[in-house]
């Protein structure tokens, strides 16, 4: 690869319009798209992950979309390696490649590098799961706060899988998960330009509401019912499915589940903003700006 090649990263919170902007940008650059979405990579999560439509997927070649099953063993380290291998091939044909997504850890794995973290002993994982079941998620939160205050301040504290994974690493290595998770920033053999898309709170919330309604019209409830036997898999520990599983269990009405999906999607969007705002290399743009592709192309030319 060469420093004359460029990875263009289109990032931002959920529902901001990354898919459409990324496709138009890739078309203008005559290149292909790499997805950086930790859920759209699973073929079974078509509706709930807001996977690009068939028309969108055929408009431009996409990679890392719907290529795995929820039962496959996959992690961010594998993703980073696979993307870098693909880029080494694609940059023989293209001057630029476009990465589109909102999973900050996946983007960092490609742009900055990520350590391959140790797998725990099965007994340790089971003990942490037992602790979750008997003492509740607050027990995991407090233990993580003691062992790794930095990651505690960053992680989704209501995601038990992430809490357990961080504690596994802390206990197995005796070091903070946050210290091991990201390597010292590496120098990639290509340029990286990060384009952030944003919207005012009111507009983004309205988009989240409209997209949630559209998902139900497309069959989100039926998709979730079909996945109910796999509800304990990490891939399904995500907004949309979690709330519907609770609805199926009788804990919520459908209206309550829908409201919770909207609320939790908004909270997720805020966490994405928090993650990305820490990166000073990101240049931000309004996603509803007129002639957005022209604006982004002009910035790329300057960069």
Image (cartoon, grey):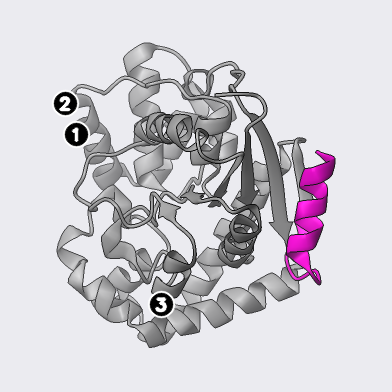
Residue 153 visible to the viewer: yes
Q: Residue at x 43, y 55 (%)?
A: 62
Q: Is residue 194 magenta?
A: no
Q: Which mark is residue 123?
A: 2
Residue 189 pos. (x, y %): 59, 22
Q: Residue at x 39, y 72 (%)?
A: 54
Tell me the quarter of the image containing the C terminus.
Answer: top right
Whether label 1 touches label 2, CB < 8 Å = yes
Q: Is residue 302 magenta?
A: yes
Whether label 2 touches label 3, CB < 8 Å = no
Tell me the quarter of the image containing the N terminus.
Answer: top right
Q: Which mark is residue 168?
A: none
How packed mark 3 is, by other alpha carbons closer than 10 Å (few <14, some 14-19, many 20 or more), is many
Residue annotated with mark 3: 257
Residue 88 pos. (x, y %): 46, 29
Residue 120 pos. (x, y %): 25, 23
SS at circle 1: helix
Quarter location, residue 286: bottom right
How packed mark 2 is, by other alpha carbons closer than 10 Å (few <14, some 14-19, many 20 or more), is few
SS at circle 2: helix
Residue annotated with mark 1: 126
Q: 15 or 266, which is in the foreground?
A: 15
User: Which contiguous range is marked in magenta?
Assistant: 285-303
Name the N-terminal-most of marks 2 and 3: 2
Residue 250 visible to the viewer: no
Residue 207 pos. (x, y %): 62, 76
């Amino acid at each position: 690869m060469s420093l004359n090649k460029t990875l263009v990263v289109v990032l931002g919170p959920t529902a901001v319009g990354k898919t459409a902007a990324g496709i138009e940008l890739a078309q203008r650059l005559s290149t292909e798209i790499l997805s950086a979405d930790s859920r759209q990579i699973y073929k079974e999560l078509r509706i709930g992950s807001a996977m690009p439509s068939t028309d969108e997927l055929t408009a431009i070649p996409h990679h890392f979309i719907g290529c795995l099953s929820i039962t496959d063993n996959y992690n961010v380290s594998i993703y980073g390696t696979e993307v870098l291998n693909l880029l080494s091939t694609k940059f023989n044909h293209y001057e630029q490649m476009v990465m589109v997504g909102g999973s900050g850890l996946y983007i960092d794995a490609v742009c900055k590098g990520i350590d391959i973290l140790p797998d725990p002993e099965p007994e340790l994982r089971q003990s942490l799961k037992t602790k979750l079941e008997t003492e509740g998620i607050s027990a995991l939160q407090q233990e993580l706060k003691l062992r790794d205050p930095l990651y505690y301040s960053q992680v989704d504290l209501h995601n038990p899988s992430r809490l357990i994974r961080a504690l596994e690493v802390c206990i197995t290595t005796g070091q903070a998960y946050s210290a091991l998770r990201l390597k010292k920033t590496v120098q990639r053999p290509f340029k990286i330009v990060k384009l952030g898309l944003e919207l005012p709170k009111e507009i983004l919330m309205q988009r989240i509401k409209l997209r949630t309604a559209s998902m139900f019209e497309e069959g989100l409830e039926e998709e979730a019912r079909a996945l109910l036997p796999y509800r304990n898999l990490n891939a399904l520990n995500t907004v949309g499915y979690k709330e519907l599983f609770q609805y199926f269990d009788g804990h919520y009405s459908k209206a309550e589940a829908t409201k919770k999906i909207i609320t939790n999607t908004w909270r997720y969007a805020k966490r994405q903003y928090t993650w990305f705002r820490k990166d000073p290399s990101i240049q931000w743009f309004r996603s509803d700006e007129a002639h957005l592709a022209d604006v982004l192309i002009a910035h790329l030319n300057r960069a």
